[in-house]
Amino acid sequence: MRMKLHILLIITLLVMTACGSKPQEPVIEPTNLHYGAEFWDLGIVCDSFVAGCAGDTDGQVFLAVSRMDTEFSPHHYLYGISSDGVPNLIIAADDFLINGAEGIVQIKNLQTGADGSVWLTIYCLTSKYSGDYLWHVDQDGAELDRIRLNQPADGTLVDDNKWTYIVSGTSVSVLNQGQQLQFTLEAGDNTAPQPVRLSNGQAGFLVTRDDISAEVRTVDTTAQDWGETYKLPKECMAVYPGNGEYLFFSTANQVLGGWNAERNSLVELVSWLEAGINTSALLGLSVDGDGQILAAVNENNSALLALLTPGADIPEKTVLTLASISNKYYLREYVSQFNRTSNTYRIVYKPYYTQTGDWFSPSEYQQGMTRLMTEIGAGKLPDLLYVDHLPVLRLGAMGMLEDLWPYIENDPDLGREAVMEHVLECAQQDGKLYTIFDSFGILTVLGSKAVVGDRTSWTLDDLRAALDTMPEGCAIFSPDYTKLETLKNTIYADLGSYVDWENGVCSFDSEDFKEVLSFCNEMESEEGASFEHFTLVPEGREMLLDDVLGNFICIQEHEAIFGGEVSYVGYPRSDGECGSSFSIINPIAMTSACKDKDGAWSFLRQFLLPQELPRDTLGDVYVSNAAFPINRTSFEALLDESMRVNSSNNEEDRPPKGTSFLGPEGMVFDLTYTPTTQAQYDQIMELYNAVTTVYTEDNALWEIISEQAQPYFAGDKSVDETAKLIQSRAEIYVNERK
C-alpha cells in the first residue's frame, strides 16, 4: 500500500571542505542546490530493521528486515526499493539453507556490488555448522556465490577486484580472490571500522577516534597498509557508497555530505532534520547520477521512503528556531515528523552541546549551557526552547516565556480535559503554564508500610521515629547516597518554598531550611561505595529507597524489594506536605519573542496529543518501561494494558511477563508481573493527587547552595553560619533576576 505524503521543503545548503591525508580543518564552499521531498509508506511488515545499503546509481535502496513468523526465532528478508516506492521481496534468508536442511539464518549487513548485485554477510546455525558466510545474489535473488568465512565478521566488503575485507573488532583482514589471507590492518583506539564501497570500486573504511577525528581510509593492497585517507568532521556518524559525482557520502551533525574527489573536499548537501528525517532512523540511502536522493527511514518501526529531488519548485516556509542544550533523540523525532508534515512551517533545531567523544562530557555540557544562557541573557531568544536542565521558573518570572494554557484550552483536539491536568497545574507559575511535556514520573521516597506508615507525606520527626524502629546501624538511604544528593533532591522537590522569583526574594535562612540542612548532615555515606537496595533493604540495613514512579507496574518491583506493601512518603517536610514531586520528561516552551506563535503551537501540540505506546517485537506494550503519558487517552490506555495479565495485541492472553533484579551476589529477585490491581492503581493516584510540586533545577543557584553547604557537612561551619551565607549569595542572585 502506497500512501504518498507530498511535502516540499526548502533546505538551506552549506558546503564544507575536508582534505585528503593532510590533517587540515574543513573549509566551507558555497552551493546553490535546493531539494523537494516526498514520502511514502512502504508497507513492509516487520518487527525490526537489520541493515540497509544503497542500490545502483539508478536510485535503489536495499533493506534487510526481521519478522517473527514463528514464536521461536526471527526470520530475515531482503527487499529492494526503487523510486516508485514499491518494495520488492528479493530473497528470504532461509533460502540459504539447501537440501531441506534446518537451521537459523540471519542477515548481519549488506553491500551492493558494481553490477547492482548484493553481497550479504550472514550468520548460519545448523546442526553441523555455526559461522559467518558471504552470500552473493543478483537483484532477482538468484544465488551468484557463497563464501564460507574462516573468522567471525562484524562487517564485510568486496571490491571491484573481488578482494574481500572482513571487519572483526578493530581489525580489517584482507583476502585475495582465492579467499587467502594476505594481511591484516588495525584501526586502533578501540575503533570498529565501518566498511563502504567507494564509487571508484575501492574499499573504504570509516574510522573514528573518540572526539579527535573521523576519516575514511582506503587500503593499499600493494604496500599492505592503509592507503589514501579522507578527513571528515569529527562528528561523522555513518558513510554510504558514492555515485558518479561523489566518491562517498557521509552524515555528520544531521547533515548529508558528498566527497568531491576533484576538489578534494566534502560538500554538504542536505540538512536531514529540515528535510523531515532523523538520522538515527535512517536505514539506507542512495544518490543517483542526477543528485536525486532515495532514503529509507524507520518511522515507529514502519518503513518510509523519502525521495529528495534537487531543483524542485519549493514554496517558501516560515522558519522557527528551536534551541536545546543537548542533541536529544526524541526531540529530533518531533522535529523531523513536523518538518515532514507541515506545508507552512519548518523547524531549525540548534543544540548547544553535541557529544564529540564516546562519553558524555560534563564540562562541555556546561559550556553549551553557558553559551545558551548567555545568548538568552543578551536578548537573543529562539522561538522555541527545550528547557530540560534550564531554570524555567526564573525564565518565566523574567517574562521570557509564553503562557501555554490559552493554546491548550483553544485547541480543537485538546482542552484541559484531554490532558493530565493536575501535573500541568503543578508545573504552572502564578497561574501561567510556561512549559509542557509529553510524559512524567513521580520522584519519591518509599519504605515499608509497616515501618513508615500508610501515608503520602511526613515530617523529620516522623522519619526519625520510624528509624528508631529499625535495627541498630540501619541507614536512612543506601550508604552510597551522599549528603549533597539528599540536599539537592530535597530542595529541588520544593524549590518554590524557598524562592519567590516574581518578587525576587528567598528564605534560605529560615528554620525550615536549617532543619533540612541538619537532616542531610545525618546521612552517613561511604565515598565510592557501591551497594544494592536488593540486599540492604531485606537485611534491615537500609530503611528508604528513592526512585521515580513512572508506570503502574513498578509498584510490584518496590513491593518485591521491601517484601510487602510500601508507602510513597516522599522527602520529609517541616510543614507536613507531600515531599514527592513530578519529574517531567521532554519539557519544552515557547518564548515570548517567538515570531509566529500559531506556528510554534502547531509544533508544540504534538507533545500533548495521543502517543503510540512503545511495544516489543511481539506487539506487547512495555508496561514496565514507560513513563506516564501526559495525554489522558494514552494514560488510560497504559492503565488498561497494565491491568491485564499481559498487554498483548492477541485475543488470548500470554503468560505474565517477568524481570530479574541482580545484586552483587548474583540474581536476588525474579519477579513475574501480575495485573495491576485496583488497590495499586488507587494508591498511585492518591500519590498523584497529593503531589503539588515539579522537580525544577537551577544550576547557578545549586552551585551557591552546594558550595556553602560542603564546609558545614565537613564540620567546619555551623548550620546558622551556613544558612546565612547561602541566603546572602542566593538573595543577590534571585533579586537581580526578578
Image (cartoon, grey):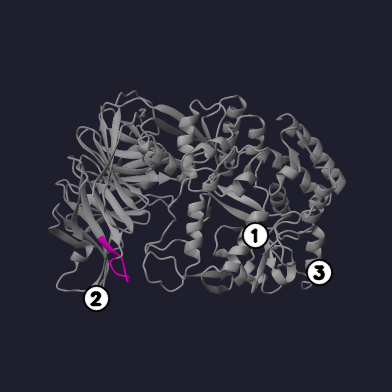
Which numbered disc, 3 or 2, marks the residue that appears first in the sequence? 2
Depth check, mark 1 against mark 3: the one in front is 1
Q: Which residues are magenta?
A: 69-76
Q: Is residue 88 left or right of residue 334?
A: left
**Label pair 3/2, CB-CB below 8 angstroms:** no
Q: Residues within 10 Å of mark 2 (few under 14, many from 20)?
A: few
Quadrant housing the C terminus:
top right
Q: In whole angstroms, how far apart are the C-alphas of marks 1 and 3?
A: 27 Å
Q: Is residue 170 visible?
A: yes
Instruction: Note whether 367 is above or below 535 in the view shown.
Output: above
The residue lying toward the viewer, choosing from 505 and 652, is 652
- Measuring 75% from the left and 44% from the top, which residue is drawn there? 497
- Callout 3 amino acid: Asp
Q: In whole angstroms, how far apart are the C-alphas of marks 3 and 2?
A: 65 Å
Q: Residue furthest bottom?
A: 127
- Callout 1 amino acid: Glu
Judged by its main secondary structure, the magenta piece is loop
Point out which mark residue 600 bears. none
Which numbered disc, 1 or 3, marks the residue that appears first in the sequence? 3
Point out which mark residue 128 bears. 2
Point out which mark residue 468 bears. 3
- Measuring 74% from the left and 67% from the top, which residue is drawn there? 452
Q: Is residue 325 visible?
A: no
Does 425 appear in magenta?
Answer: no
Point out which mark residue 686 bears. 1
- Callout 2 amino acid: Lys
